[in-house]
Amino acid sequence: MWRARLSSLGEERSRFRYAPGKWSIQEVFGHGIDAERIFTCRALRISRNDRTPLPGFEQDDYIRFGPWERIPPPDVLREFTCVREASVLPFQGLDEAAWNRRGAASGHEVTVRALAYITAGHAAHHLRVLEPKYGLGG
């Protein structure tokens, strides 16, 4: 359903911002892409018992310096869909020990299980924001 809605948006509508300084529709999807890559990288590293503390990221810089306004809407949607699928697959083969491993990310202790929930919840949150703020009903 989100695929159909975004794929039907034209170039102008996909760049809609509900207020000055807010992200465009494309940038919301771009943020989802960037964040999923980071969250799943954290989960991979921690699940493999990598004890290196993992840094945070400045989401607004990722948008400011990202390509999202230059990419055609269908390509952003295709990337979002591919990243979403790639985000889910690595969690499928984890054993209980891997799910429970703890590491540090953004200065906080987190488990691999929590990162799976964060990844899914983050995407759901932003998709819900598109309904009232951007007029894209689900």
Image (tube, rainbow, N blue to C red):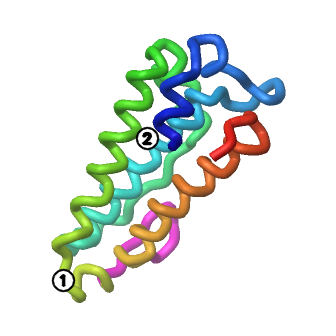
Is 41 above or below relative to 51? Answer: above
Image check: 50 left or right of 102?
Answer: left
Q: Where residue 103 sits: x, y (%)?
A: 36, 74
Image check: 115 left or right of 40?
Answer: right
Q: Where residue 124 sits: x, y (%)?
A: 56, 56
Is 43 above or below relative to 94? Answer: above
Disc on res. 50: none
| Residue designated by label 2 | 33
| Residue designated by label 1 | 95
Q: Nearer the viewer, residue 42 or 82?
A: 82
* Residue type beneath disc 2: Ile
Query: Residue, x 52% and y 41% (percent of image)?
Result: 2
Mark with earlier residue (2, 1): 2
Q: Give the SS element for disc 2.
A: helix
For marks 2 and 1, give the CA distance: 26 Å
Q: Where residue 126 sits: x, y (%)?
A: 61, 48
Is 72 above or below relative to 93? Answer: above
* Residue type beneath disc 1: Asp
Q: Give the SS element for disc 1.
A: loop
Q: Nearer the viewer, residue 111 or 72?
A: 72
Magenta portion: prevailing SS class: strand
Question: Few, some or many C-alpha atoms within 10 Å of disc 1 (few <14, some 14-19, many ≥20)?
Answer: few
Residue 25 falls within the magenta-colored stretch: no
Magenta residues, start to end: 101-110
Query: Residue, x 61% and y 36% (percent of image)?
Result: 60
State which quadrant residue 94 falls in: bottom left
Q: Where residue 55 sits: x, y (%)?
A: 44, 55
State which quadrant residue 110 falls in: bottom left
Question: Few, some or many C-alpha atoms within 10 Å of disc 2 (few <14, some 14-19, many ≥20)?
Answer: many
Residue 104 falls within the magenta-colored stretch: yes
